[in-house]
Image (tube, rainbow, N blue to C red):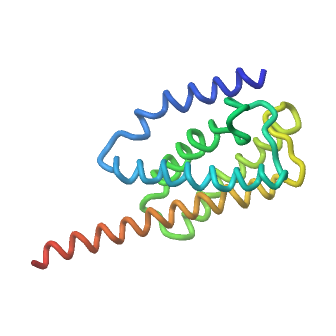
Amino acid sequence: MEKKLLNLLTALCIVSLPFLFKGSKMRENLVIFFSKGVIATLIDAYVVGTKRLEYPVRPFSKIFKTNIIYDILFFPLLSVLWVKLSYNDNLSKILLKSLIFSVPMSIGQWYFEKNSRLFKWKRWTPFHTFGSCSFTLLTIRGLVGLLKKLDKFKNTGYNAS
């Protein structure tokens, strides 16, 4: 069952790629995607390395101790979607919308930890998932805010000359 779930998740992610990466903000979306992949992989490697969490069923289990589908495909795509939904929002709306992603992610991970072999928690709880998910979403959203400011600065700098 677990391999079928991972294959379904992979297929859904691949199908969503063209829809999430179309439009005028391709560069930003790629920065979001790859930045979130790096952050998720680093955090996951630490969490798995310190034996807080493990992935009994994962692709390329002889090579990776983490689940690369989550780290380099699912979470980055979710971040691209989240930034698209919160792109023009103020801080309070950004924080509220982060809950829309972090809470279901925590509940979903809790459910799958109890009912599948996708996750095995050792020193991990839904609150850890909530905290790490919120942290990475807000970190990526902060990066996008910085990029927006740099683009604005760059565009006003060119117009002045």
Q: Is residue 105 above or below residue 95?
A: above
> Could you tell me which residue is drawn at 61 percent across and 59 percent down?
136
Position of 15 with respect to 27 (left or right) is right
> Can you give x and y, in whole percent of width and height, for residue 111 in the image?
82, 39
> Could you tell me which residue is drawn at 59 percent across and 56 percent down?
39
Position of 141 with respect to 59 (left or right) is left
116 or 122, nearer to the observer: 122
Residue 95: quarter of image: bottom right
> Can you give x and y, in whole percent of width and height, for residue 114 in the image?
88, 37
98 or 63, nearer to the observer: 63
Picture quarter with the N terminus = top right
7 or 110, nearer to the observer: 7
Q: Residue furthest front?
A: 62
Q: Residue furthest bottom?
A: 160
> Could you tell me which residue is drawn at 38 percent across and 65 percent down?
147
Residue 59: quarter of image: top right
Q: Residue furthest left?
A: 161
Picture quarter with the C terminus = bottom left
Position of 88 with respect to 131 (left or right) is left
> Could you tell me which residue is drawn at 81 percent across and 43 percent down?
54
Position of 147 with respect to 109 (left or right) is left
Q: Is residue 133 above or below residue 19?
A: below
Q: How many marks?
A: 0
> Can you give x and y, in whole percent of width and height, for residue 90 in the image?
49, 69
> Can you give x and y, in whole percent of width and height, for residue 145 in the image?
43, 67
Q: Is residue 150 above or below residue 57?
A: below
